[in-house]
Image (cartoon, coloured by chain):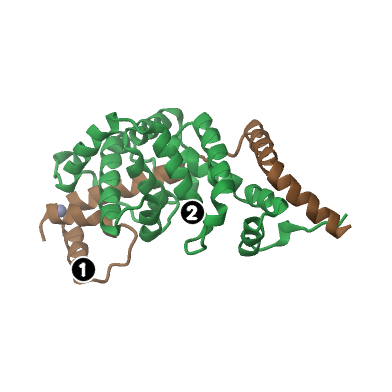
Amino acid sequence: MNKRIPRHLPDDALIAQAKSGDNLAFTELVRRYEETVYRFSYKICRDKEKASETLQDTFVNVFRKLKSFDGKSKFSTWLYTIVTNNCLMKHRKRKSDELEESLEAYDHARHTEDTVQRPELVSSEHSPADIVIGKELRDILETAMLKLPEDYRVVFVMRDIEGRSSEETAGVLGLSNEATKSRLRRARAFLRDQLHPYISAHPELVR
Amino acid sequence: MKCDKVYLHICDHLDEEITSPRCRQIKQHLEECPNCRAYLDSLKKTIVLYKAMPEPSVPAGTHRELFKTISSLTLSPGRARAKKRRCTRKS
Ligand SMILES: [Zn+2]
């Protein structure tokens, strides 16, 4: 039996083969991007079951739509767009709209006394490797993240957690660069306010 | 530059090069203003904490489900025929 070994193919070639209807190449493509899609789904859904569902739905969509992938964006960007659409469709809830409005308040800077802190809190670099996130903190992080409307969550996750560009993030959400930036600004300010009581009570947390 | 202006722009420049005149103003304000410095610091910490959250891997059951779905897709009638044709041609 003539065995091709798609594992050694670079992504571009693999995608081209999968597009032409090669099932082995498609399966390899799924294998290669399974973790990426799952993790991104999890970071948006914040729930393992929903992330598993989104993973399935995403690759079913990829199978059906792969022919329309034109290679103008990165393949991972295209995947993220599908994940985001799946998440947004599945979990679109009206209650997020209320918060969306209140998030606009974060455009107007607030200067509250509680931001005045002991100078030793002001440090320059933080290394995530040293941080152990206990249960209490994890709950606070999750609760705050779940309060964010999903498109804000996508922006925060892509920009600040994954370090992707503003243009790429805007492309995934179909937003302008400006709208993406303002969402990032609001999302950060909102999350910061949610975490602030815990952070200021635990100055040793991040050094 | 006043605090509220700085607040609005701090976030834009959190990880970016500070070169433009506006950014220089912000930087200068930060040097003089402990409030804004503390705010920026807690913003940075917020991001660091989210980045430090553990990320789960695909659970074994989910992986199996996914590949079951994939093989049912790739072995659907149209595709299966195409595959057969290719194989016949090769042998
Ligand atoms: Zn200030």
Q: Quadrant of the N terminus of chain B?
A: bottom left
Q: Quadrant of the C terminus of chain B?
A: bottom right
Q: Are marks 2 and 1 on the same chain?
A: no
What x and y, as percent, mark residue B3? 13, 53
Q: Is residue A200 visible?
A: no
Label 2 chain ID: A
Identify which residue, A144 or B60, lies in the foreground: B60
Question: Which residue, given by chain and number where applicable, does mark 2 sit on?
Answer: A78
Instruction: Give the residue displayed 65% in from the left and 37% down from the top.
Output: B69
A94 lies above or below A9: above
In this rendering, position of residue A169 left or right of residue B84: left
Which amino acid type corresponds to the residue marked 2 in the rendered image?
A: Trp
Label at residue B24? 1
What x and y, as percent, mark residue A31? 66, 47
> In the image, which is nearer the foreground, mark 2 or mark 1?
2
| Chain letter for the part of the structure drawn in brown | B
Identify which residue, A89 or B4, lies in the foreground: A89
In this rendering, position of residue A40 left or right of residue A173: right
Label 1 chain ID: B
Instruction: Give the residue displayed 65% in from the left and 56% down from the top.
Output: A18
Numbered disc total: 2
Instruction: Give the residue displayed 18% in from the left and 48% down from the top.
Output: A107
What x and y, as percent, mark residue A106? 19, 44
| The CB of the residue at mark 2 lies under 8 Å from ligand 1 | no
| Chain letter for the part of the structure drawn in green | A
Identify which residue, A206 or A64, lies in the foreground: A64
Which amino acid type corresponds to the residue marked 1 in the rendered image?
A: Arg
